Amino acid sequence: VNTRRTLWLPNVGSLLWLAFFLGLTLTQWRLIMINADGDACLHWRIGNWMIDHRAVIHADAFLHTRAGASFITKEWLAEVLFAAAGDVLDWNGIVLLSAALIATYLWLLHRELLAEGSELISSTALTILAAMSCSVHWLARPLLYSHLFTVIFTWQLRLFDRGQLTTRQLLLRLAPVMVLWVNLHGAFFTGFVIIATFFMGNTIVLLTCPRGVRPVALKKLGSLAAVAVACMLATLLNPNGWRLPAHILEFFRDPLLATYTTEFRSPDFHWNNLSGFSIELAALAVTLIVLRPALSATDVAVVGTWGLLSLLSARNGPVFALVVTPILAEHLHEALTKAVPGRCIDAYRRLSAHMTVLNRSANGWGTVVLVSIVLVAVMAKPKMLGGQPLVTSGVLSNRFPVAATQFVDAHPAAVSGEMYNTFSWGGYLILYLPAHKVFVDGRNDFYGMALIREWNDVDQIHQDWDAILKKYRVGWTILPRNHALNSFLALRTDWRLAYEDDVADIYTRRPE
Amino acid sequence: MFVCATIVWLLHRQLLAEGNELLLSTVLALLAAAVCATHWLARPHLATQLLVVVFAWQLRWFQRGRTTTCRLLILLPLLTALWANLHGAFVIAFALIGIHWVGTVASWVGATADEKPAVRHRVMVLTALGAACLLATLLNPNGWRLPLRVVSYMSSPLLMGLAQEYLPPNFRDPTMLPFLLVCVLTLLMLVIVRPRLNATDALLLLAWFLLSLRMVRNCAAVCARGCADPRRTLEHAYLRAAPPSLAPPPLPRLFPRVMTSVDQMAGASGLPMLATIAMVLILAKPQLFGGPPLIRTELPAGRFPASAVQFLRHSPDAVSGEMFNEYAWGGYLILALPERKVFIHPNLDAYGEKLTRQFLQVNNIRPGWQDVLARYRVGWTILPRDHPLNQVLARRDDWNLVYTDPISSIYGRKQ
């Protein structure tokens, strides 16, 4: 291998990072990331509020139905970071930050697989498979930080489980990461579930191992318990202290959670965007059936727990992929090593060996940095040089009521009283109609199921719909054009159509 | 319930006939019954569950050389002809034959020169079986149009999305717990026992697992189709393959043997027959002996608009024109109000996507809903009391409330 190439040729891991970073930024993915629902707008607006007030938000400022109510933010730091990126480069900034997070956690996963001794081609293929599974949640949201920390937690715990990390090192690595996690996203409980699966696996080892090995197994369990306690204490280091974990536990206990939140429901395998998760499950099943690997008790606990959790809630699918991929890689590598030589296997091994040598000699991080800087410059062109943007990111006018909000902005007198809005537009309206407060947004953990039920009663035009609207002094509605409530309000003499386009209708209550 | 009991009995018999131990076979048949119970409804798909067990059994026996080619080629096409006339899910037969075909072809790779003629023979027989079964599906009152209709129905995301049983399983639903347990047991079997599955069993396990994740109705098929190898392997794990630290204590080892001995001694097959006759007599008591029934089986009053139907029977002139009805009530209304025709019923394949879209347009009050009602000359609606359309009709001058109770409301168009 020509060593001069090392100066410009990035290794496979860096190339993966660059490919995901560029791919997510320059394709339709950037629009998907910010247009899936109104949450990207919501986080930007809340982050902006905190930047403007130079304080962490503790009371709601966006809902008229819960105005001033005590608000526990689960992701204040992520919202500030998203808002800062948005303030600097508009939507392009948020896209760049999200793409960098996704590319980084996939790069880390690839590094983990290689560091654990897996072979280059299979590691790369499995990382791409994990990426396909995770793509269902490639959205500009704080959840991306949870995926990043999931990879870090799994990697460090696997190192510890194999005796490659001391208890002290594990504590010093995971506790600070947990402090970051608890301030960046509410799914920091994932970290405890990962620790619990390793604890479960080691408990099985303790119960089944020969008597002489028990002290070692017991010590390992003690270390994991200490790490869990340290991480638990670390979760208190957030602006809301103990109230944040308590609030999240309370939220998870609500039986209606899965009824009203799509991502907490069981995965709908009819969705095309879940095909990656289906393939990951099939890959696991094929590995277990065909390769018949001798899984450790910890691996069984990890696969079983996360398999079950991913079937219960669609949002656990990416976590399943991130924690199971290292197990798949380990046993695929083992099978490839033990495979009986043949024409295909020999050719594969030659290719793999050649690629590995090339990969080790490649050290072209400079190329990756250079391309990334060029991309950021392209995305930032209007801010830096003025004029038209070269790459445009923004909310889609056929998905959100862009023209309707412009109408309300231009004719503030056209509406009066409070707003009734559809659930998925809440975040968008908070960002683009800051003069008005919304009825609901994506934070159902904050305002609770009581308000969701009231919102739903109006949405489904139940008997008490008008009483609920009057209770909240609703004077106007902004709803998708096909919404049943529009057809209903059109028949009522006490409401009138104030605005309509292909996306949204606005109805206002006539003065009594 | 007779069909349900027969399904479980047949599965149990299959497990025993394949040499599995009695206690484990019974536990696994009961577990399969718990999974199938989510679909123990008085519907034709029970025939599918029954025939899946028979097909899977026969194909497994053929694979193991325990049934003759002639018997397979006569029995299964005959059953397919029956299946095509009993329930539309007869395509499962082709999925089962297809998986066995692919598995047998795959086994060619690892077969020795001596084994290859037998493998080739099995491939040819399965090919002939697939063709014979395909021809057998034509033996129905609609001929070639039936299989075509089924395929067309299954390729429509709209129709498949509307029927609950075609939706993916909701694992948060407690009724899915038995299926989850089956998944966990299968996973444990694969990681602890590490069985050496042949290509056909591996494909069956993989294909039906993925299909059950796509459609809740396939969960029952997974358990009813009787992939006996995993069960057998579990038995091996329990009785033989367990490491010394996990070896079962003497009593659990003894218990299955005692059970098997008792079972071999028991020959009172007349007792279940007697119990069945007694149960039929009890249920048929009003018809046979008169008087009130001993066991009453009725449609639950809180689930269907029984009072509204009674009102319509007593006051047939209260409504005129055609009906617009709740989707889930279609079947009930067809039975309870035979003199009226419904707008829609759950047999979506009967009328296709166009009418389904029009139904959804009215049901979700989308723009143009009045045009649909006018096109079908709908003169009255019968919908759940809380249905949004009731609220809309209540505000319209050309409709009025004809009847209401806690379950349903009837609105009629003013003349």
Image (tube, coloured by chain):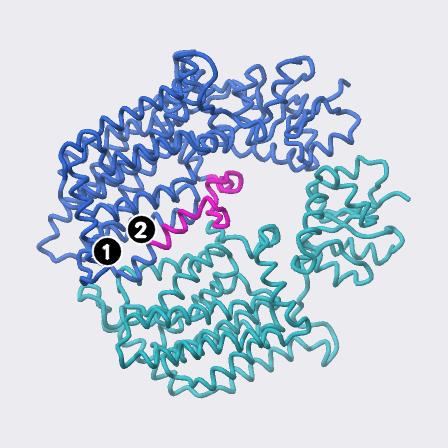
Residue position for label 1: A295
Give the extent of the magenta segment: A254-283
Say which element carries label 1.
Answer: loop
Depicted B248 relative to depicted A95: above or below = below
Are marks 1 and 2 in one subunit?
Answer: yes
Residue A383 percent coordinates (x, y): 42, 13
In depth, the one of B7 and B342 nearer the eye is B342
| Residue at x 55%, y 84% (from the top left corner) | B273
Q: Is residue A110 left or right of residue B148?
A: left
For the residue pair B78 and B398, the one nearer the viewer reads as B78
Q: Is residue B244 left or right of residue A272?
A: left
Residue B309 in picture, x, y percent from top left: 78, 56
Label 1 packing within 10 angstroms: few (<14), some (14-19), many (20+): some
Front residue of B401/B116: it is: B116
The number of callouts visible is: 2
- x and y percent of residue B265 in the render? 38, 87
Question: Label 2: few (<14), some or many (≥20) within 10 Å?
Answer: many
The residue at which mark 2 appears reads as A303
**Above or below: residue A208 compared with residue A221:** below
Q: Is residue B223 above or below residue A511?
A: below
Mark 1 → mark 2, Cα distance in angstroms: 10 Å
- Which secondary structure lies at badge 2? helix
Disc number for residue A269: none
Q: Is residue A149 visible?
A: no
Q: Is residue A113 left or right of residue A483?
A: left
